[in-house]
Amino acid sequence: MTRKERFHSIIGWFAQNQPAVQSELHYTNPFQLLVAVILSAQCTDKRVNLVTPPLFEAFPTPEALAAASFDQVYPFVKSVSYPNAKARHLIAMAQMLLADYSGTVPSDIDELMKLPGVGRKTANVIASIVYDQPVIAVDTHVFRVAHRLGLSDGSTPRAVELDLERHIPAAQRPIAHHWLILHGRYICTARNPKCPECPLSAWCREAFADKEEVAAEVGEYLATLVRVRRQRAKESGLTEREMEVIRYCREGLSNSEIADRMFLSVNTIKNHKQRIFAKLNVRSVSELLAAIDRMGII
């Protein structure tokens, strides 16, 4: 079966059987959606939906959130993953939203990615849902489903995104993200996928396959992915230690927390960050995270 045939069959099934799906995040305006998507990074939508109602009540506008302190915001988000970083990102995002965009969530992908806490995936979600732009956000669910169904063999989220956009008609891209993410969340799960009840098993490359064979293929794929990313990091001039610092930055750890993990001084971590910023031509951690997403380094 050709890739074109796969796309035609799979997207056709979704269009016929799930014509009206939407984000499971709760929001009433673009600003609230942006906040919710930032909080949803490596966190479940269910958890985010528990957190956002009191958060939105306390900080209903960009002006209110921009004027808040870390100590005021943190209690509302402490139950999500990486609460320290996300609390800081939300405040800085609201401040930039006011300073650079008059409080309006921008529609341009590149402009969205300038906001603290916003990487390419988050930018694509906002552009797709709010502005109905023909883009597809690739998170872990979409990445996994695309590979299992043979829709992409890309080694990075960006590569998978390009494959999906190349084959899915522009008009269907905004909803296609929801099709794939919900299928990955409830049927094609990372562990113990529900293959017997999956309506797409006829097109799946792994459904009912021998577990040892699948494990070997996954292991080989992951090893290849690691080699590719290490090569890209090497091409960027990054050392292994600098890569480790970047990984901890992505987890939202502070300089002191990274120093504790790496058994180094805070000043040494700061120096590492300055060298990383210079090598990747960025000025902040949020710009760094957006850059490594684009480059497929981590």
Image: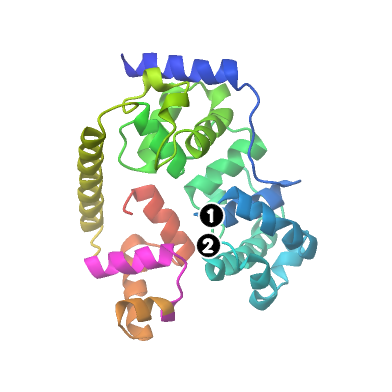
Binning the other alpha carbons within 10 Å of mark 1 as few (below 14), some (14 to 19) or many (20 upward) gives some
Where residue 175 appears, x then y in whole percent?
Answer: 58, 29
Distance, label 2 to label 1, CA atoms, is 6 Å
Q: Residue at x 46, y 19 (%)?
A: 10
Where residue 188 appears, x then y in whole percent?
Answer: 44, 34
Q: Quadrant of the N terminus?
A: top left
Q: Helix, strand or loop at disc 2?
A: loop
Please state which amino acid type lies under the numbered disc 2.
Answer: Ser
Q: Which circle marks residue 200 in the picture?
A: none
User: Is any atom of residue 270 visible in this view?
Assistant: no
Where residue 77 appears, x then y in whole percent?
Answer: 63, 65
Q: Mark 1 points at which residue?
A: 43
Q: Does the magenta stretch include residue 247?
A: yes
User: Is any atom of residue 119 visible in this view?
Assistant: yes
- Residue range of the region highlighted in magenta in the rendering: 240-256
Residue 250, image quadrant: bottom left
| Marks 2 and 1 in Cβ contact (< 8 Å) | yes
What colour scheme was applied to this rendering of the protein? rainbow
Q: Mark 2 points at which residue?
A: 81
Q: Residue at x 44, y 39 (%)?
A: 189
Q: Helix, strand or loop at disc 1?
A: loop
